[in-house]
Image (tube, rainbow, N blue to C red):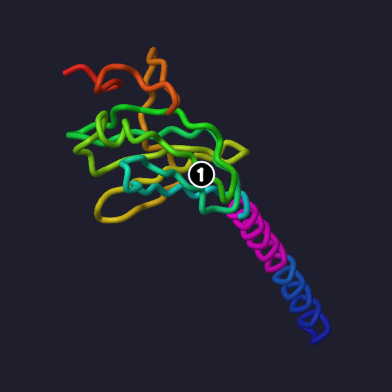
Amino acid sequence: MSWSSVSAVASACIALAAVVLNAVLFRMARAAEKDRARQQRMPVLVSFRDDDGSIRVSNVGWGPATNVFFASWGGSCYFNPLHLTPIPAGGAEVIPAEYGNVKSAEVGRFGMSYTDPLGTPYSTKISNEGSEVVQARILPEWPGLAIPYPGSLPGQKNWGRPPR
């Protein structure tokens, strides 16, 4: 075998490796850009109990939170679900003190599920131990239940509990 044919094979191998490396780097750059775009539109909801017992839900993320649902955790299930209006980045919604003081008085854990404007689901779990944001819906569906908004709480103390 002559040196010119070895050189040709080596050049072809180097060219092929360069093409493969460029393809891999391109895919990695696209994935990083997609993740960056998601993070720029990602809402992050947190909640705090005010002194009067009301619960303030604030969006500390970069994008608006849509399809927002809030519920109490008790025993082994979520109950007393509320449907909140969309919360813009930097905005807040207040759940009346009646919810925190009467409807969910002894509850120390809450959950919120919401989406970004493109429908990606997120949830925040809140307890005395802290808050955790996950990229999934943690609240169940409540088929057949008309989930109230904070301004129109039902008369009963509990709603949306599964039958025992």
| Residue positioned 81% across, 77% down in the render | 8
In the figure, is residue 82 to the left or right of 67? left
- Based on the picture, tell me whether residue 34 belongs to the magenta stretch: yes
Residue 151, x across and y down, in percent: 44, 26
Magenta span: predominant SS is helix
In depth, the one of 31 and 77 nearer the eye is 77
Range drawn in magenta: 20-39
- Based on the picture, tell me whether residue 123 belongs to the magenta stretch: no
Mark 1 highlights which residue?
92
Residue 150, x across and y down, in percent: 42, 28
Q: Quadrant of the N terminus?
A: bottom right
| Residue positioned 67% across, 66% down in the render | 25
| Residue positioned 38% across, 15% down in the render | 145
Vertical relation: 14 (above or below) 112: below
Q: Quadrant of the C terminus?
A: top left
In the figure, is residue 18 to the left or right of 117? right
Helix, strand or loop at label 1? It is strand
Vertical relation: 58 (above or below) 105: below
The part of the image, by quadrant, that contains residue 52 is top left
In the figure, is residue 88 to the left or right of 23? left
Q: Residue type at mark 1?
A: Ala
In the figure, is residue 18 to the left or right of 148? right
The part of the image, by quadrant, that contains residue 10 is bottom right
| Residue extending farthest front | 52
Residue 91, x across and y down, in percent: 55, 46
| Residue extending farthest top | 144
